[in-house]
Image (cartoon, helix red, strand yellow):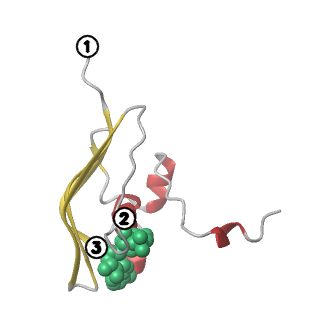
Amino acid sequence: MEPTKSVLNVNGIEVIYNHVILVLKGVSLNVPEGKIAAVLGGNGAGKTTTLRAISNLLKAERGEVTKGSIELRGERIENLTPADLVNRGVVQVMEGRHCFAHLT
Ligand SMILES: Nc1ncnc2c1ncn2[C@@H]1O[C@H](COP(=O)(O)OP(=O)(O)OP(=O)(O)O)[C@@H](O)[C@H]1O
Ligand SMILES: [Mg+2]
């Protein structure tokens, strides 16, 4: 049997906010082709930060990935813009029902 291909690979990332607040250290996850991955954790554990690192939306929050790597289908994506990532199918759905308040 062929080994399952990986769609998304997060390898040992570290994230710091405001140049000083270390919130993620050595976070790794793997999403295999055709599978669904869930990230579980208590309030403030770093779930949203992990997603922001993947979708490259940390800059707006004064956060940055300072260690590790993120790969989409084997290609490094840490330096892609959020727009480039969306074009490749990496879309972060924002939290909170208010984002649909104006829709019928
Ligand atoms: N913009 C920011 N500046 C500084 N610290 C932040 C910022 N955003 C989040 N943090 C801190 O980073 C840590 C991880 O927060 P994060 O929002 O990623 O957790 P979470 O797992 O998504 O929590 P929740 O379950 O409440 O959504 C927390 O200690 C939080 O206070
Ligand atoms: Mg969150």
At label 3, which amino acid type do we have? Glu
Q: Which residue is mark 3?
A: 64
Q: Which quadrant of the view contains residue 99? A: bottom right
Is residue 46 at all visible to an observer of this figure? yes
Which one is in front in this view, the residue at disc 1 or the one at disc 3?
1
Q: Nearer the viewer, residue 58 or 98?
A: 98
Q: CA separation, marks 1 and 3?
A: 39 Å
In the foreground, 76 or 13: 13
Q: Amino acid at mark 2?
A: Lys
Q: Position of residue 56 (x, y in %)?
A: 38, 64
Q: Tell whether circle 2 marks a residue whose Cβ is less than 8 angstroms from ligand 1.
A: yes
Q: Position of residue 55 (x, y in %)?
A: 41, 60
Q: Residues within 10 Å of mark 3 (few under 14, many from 20)?
A: many
Alpha carbon distance from label 2 to label 1: 33 Å
Lower sequence index among marks 1 and 3:
1
Distance from disc 2 to disc 3, alpha carbons, whole Å, reads: 15 Å
74 or 24: nearer the eye?
24
Quarter containing the C terminus: bottom right
The residue that disc 2 covers is 47
Q: Where does ligand 2 appear, by image quarter? A: bottom left
Within 10 Å of disc 2 (Cα), the crowding (few <14, some 14-19, many 20+) is some
Tag on residue 1? 1
Q: Secondary structure at mark 2?
A: helix
Number of residues whose C-alpha sits closer than 10 Å to that of mark 1, classed few (under 14), some (14–19) or many (20 or more):
few
Q: Residue at coordinates 30% horizontally, 58% vertically from top-left? A: 78
Helix or strand or loop: what does disc 1 sit on? loop
Where residue 33 sits, quadrant-wise, is top left
